[in-house]
Image (cartoon, rainbow, N blue to C red):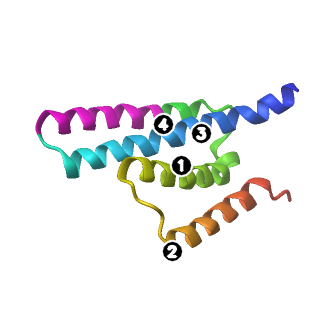
Amino acid sequence: MIKNMQNLAPVVFILIATTLEVSGDALVRMAIYKHTGLIRLALMLAGAVLLFGYGFSLNLAPVEFGQIVGLYITTLFIIWQIINFIAFQTLPTPAIMIGGLLIVTGGMIITFWRH
């Protein structure tokens, strides 16, 4: 049971980190392209806080980054598509879906291939 929880911890940190990273990036993008004045400034500051939270939470994961990089990239791609749809109402194109399948496949190979 404890071993399974130790394996779960990096996944939780990765989910938090990727969600913060992509959300922060989306806020900065909205600030740059859709707003001006104080709203732009507020969105940029909020984005900066989320991006800091991403770096902080990822570095709290109880494993070396090199050990989870495949899972991180896979999760980042998936979360990116979800946030892209929520924030910008944009569905992935066929090219993104095919490329994403390659990203997810590669990430799973990196994560689970045992030498």
Query: Tag on residue 15?
Result: 3
Q: Secondary structure at mark 4?
A: helix
- Circle 1/circle 3 CB separation < 8 Å: yes
Q: Secondary structure at mark 1?
A: helix
Cα distance in 3D space between marks 1 and 3: 8 Å
Q: Nearer the viewer, residue 34 or 17?
A: 34
> Is 24 drawn above or below residue 84 in the view shown?
above
Return the disc, 1 or 3, that comes first in the chain's sequence.
3
Query: Tag on residue 95?
Result: 2
Q: Nearer the viewer, mark 4 or mark 1?
A: 1
Image quadrant of residue 59?
top right
Query: Tag on residue 14?
Result: none
Return the disc, 3 or 4, that comes first in the chain's sequence.
3
Query: Tag on residue 55?
Result: 4
- Residue type highlighted by circle 4: Gly
Residue range in magenta is 37-53
Cα distance in 3D space between marks 4 and 2: 29 Å
